[in-house]
Image: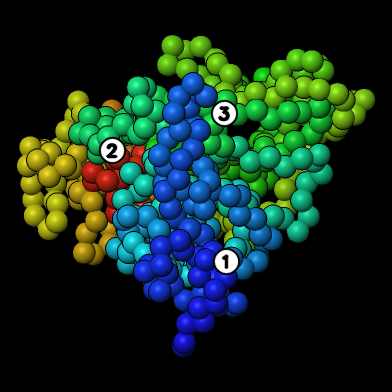
């Protein structure tokens, strides 16, 4: 294959001439998605712009939209000074396109490219983010929304994506506080920011009209923060979790918990009066509810609010049958501050807590610290599996399975909603079940990314 280096391709693909030679760009090349440095005004205007790592210079990356069953082709062009890769979080994807450096592909070196090409079986709200040293790369800004549209979208006036984040900035310089792998963060709740916001700003504003009906697609892209959210001047329903439609819309009453990497789709009606401000509140550290997303209400969309929405059309393969005969697995989570690890296996060797700490490792899953040669479990294609997660730490963990969604098996045996990321709380064992219907090597890890980087990272294999 001869690279067809057109002049236009040359200019748009890369500014640096030497690096551009490595990048064949032809008329048939996929659209580039360029990972590169940029500056962004994340902090209030009296602060400097922040040096970020971005997709196409934007924080967050552009909203990628495609229809259900559609095909996404994107060329990652790595203009960062470090290797990177992209994970398409929540897509029941072809394993080779999952973007996990070291498991499903090699990290893409600086100055090189990788073509992602996959289909999207499920409609819903997803996101994409770096999956090479993600603890640092996601914190620096490498994340964006990925929206897969239903053939028959719900009847709403507007569809809005709100990607939440928090940033840990040095308050003097408005630059990212370093290092990203401070042992304090690794061993405690993770990399928690000191500036909260959404859609790349500390003060997200979404103008609305009275009685307008909106679909809000909430995404938590923060490294470790759990958002507790509440509607203000809005009334609404949860219609999907982690992309997957609920059987019937559930009225929002009280707080919406959004753990790292989780998504919630809401359909809301603006009930605040014209001239008032609706929005989303979040539970701050001092236990007060504070405005996070402002929705100034101007004008009127309709005389009345509408009738309750109907459920979104279900996605394929949402059943988890065969629970009784299912293989049962158990995974104990241990480690972290206040508990520690007595002994666990790291890189093939048993180590005590102290030695692990010296290696920057603080957590274990099923007695293993971080990635292993052999998977935590090998599953047969099509089998149903039940996995008990036992949280023997004093911290919350957002456990995420790649490639497949699962359902919680509640204490009474009933199944919870289908998700790809579930919040595990200290001393509250929970069980999930899924059909191993996607072949390949799939990560199972904590989405508190500092935890994943210091031990809470394992994988399963489906064949
Ligand atoms: Cu969104 Cu392995 O991650
Ligand atoms: Cu964790």
Contact between marks 2 and 1 (CB within 8 A): the answer is no
- Tell me which residue sits at (57%, 28%) in the image: 256
User: Is 332 drawn above or below residue 403 in the view shown?
Assistant: above
Hey, which residue is sitting farthest right in the picture? 303
Q: Disc 3 versus disc 1: distance between alpha carbons?
A: 36 Å
Q: Quadrant of the C terminus?
A: bottom left
Going from N to C along the chain, the mark reached first, 3 or 1, is: 1
The residue lying at 77 percent from left, 51 percent from top is 153
Q: Earlier in the sequence, mark 2 or mark 1?
A: 1
Pinpoint residue 21: horizontal percent, then vertical percent. 40, 74
Mark 3 residue crowding within 10 angstroms, few (<14) / some (14–19) / many (20+): some
Which residue is found at the position 32% from the left and 55% from the top?
A: 81
Which residue lies under the disc numbered 3? Answer: 256
Q: Is residue 410 visible in this depiction of the protein?
A: no
Q: Is residue 338 above or below residue 13?
A: above
Residue annotated with mark 2? 180
Which numbered disc covers residue 31? 1
């Amino acid at each position: 294959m001869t690279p067809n280096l057109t002049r236009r391709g040359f200019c748009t693909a890369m500014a640096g001439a030497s690096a551009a030679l490595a990048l064949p760009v032809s008329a048939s090349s996929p659209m580039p998605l360029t990972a590169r440095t940029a500056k962004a005004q994340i902090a209030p205007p009296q602060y400097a712009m922040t040096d970020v790592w971005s997709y196409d210079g934007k924080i967050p990356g552009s909203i990628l939209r495609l229809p259900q069953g559609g095909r996404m082709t994107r060329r990652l062009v790595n203009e960062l000074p470090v290797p990177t890769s992209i994970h398409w979080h929540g897509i029941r994807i072809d394993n080779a396109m999952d973007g996990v450096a070291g498991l499903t592909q090699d990290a893409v070196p600086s100055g090189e490219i990788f073509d992602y090409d996959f289909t999207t079986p499920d409609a819903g709200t997803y996101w994409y983010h770096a999956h090479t040293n993600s603890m640092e790369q996601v914190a620096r800004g490498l994340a964006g929304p990925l929206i897969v549209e239903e053939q028959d979208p719900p009847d709403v006036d507007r569809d809005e994506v709100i990607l939440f984040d928090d940033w840990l900035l040095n308050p003097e310089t408005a630059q990212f506080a370093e290092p990203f792998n401070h042992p304090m963060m690794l061993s405690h709740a993770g990399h928690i920011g000191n500036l909260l916001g959404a859609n790349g700003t500390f003060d997200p504003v979404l103008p609305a009209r009275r009685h307008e009906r909106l679909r809000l697609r909430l995404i938590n892209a923060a490294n470790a923060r759990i958002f507790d959210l509440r509607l203000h001047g809005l009334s609404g329903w949860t219609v999907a979790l982690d992309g997957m439609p609920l059987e019937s819309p559930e009225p929002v009453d009280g707080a919406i918990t959004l753990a790292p990497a989780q998504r919630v789709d809401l359909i809301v009606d603006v009930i605040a009066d014209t001239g008032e401000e609706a929005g989303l509140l979040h539970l701050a550290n001092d236990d007060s509810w504070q405005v996070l997303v402002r929705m100034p209400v101007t004008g009127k969309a309709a005389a009345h609010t509408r009738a309750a929405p109907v459920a979104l059309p279900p996605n394929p393969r949402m059943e988890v049958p065969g629970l009784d005969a299912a293989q049962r697995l158990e995974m104990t989570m241990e480690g972290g501050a206040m508990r520690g690890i007595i002994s666990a296996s790291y890189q093939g060797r048993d180590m005590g807590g102290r030695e692990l700490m010296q290696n920057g490792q603080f957590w274990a899953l099923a007695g293993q610290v971080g990635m292993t040669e052999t998977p935590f479990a090998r599953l047969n294609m099509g089998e149903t599996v039940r996995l008990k997660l036992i949280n023997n730490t004093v911290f919350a963990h957002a456990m995420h399975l790649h490639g497949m969604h699962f359902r919680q098996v509640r204490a009474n045996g009933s199944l919870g909603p289908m998700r790809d990321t579930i919040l595990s709380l200290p001393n509250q064992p929970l069980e999930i079940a899924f059909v191993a219907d996607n072949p390949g090597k799939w990560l199972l890890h904590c989405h508190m990314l500092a935890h994943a980087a210091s031990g809470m990272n394992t994988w399963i294999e489906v064949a």
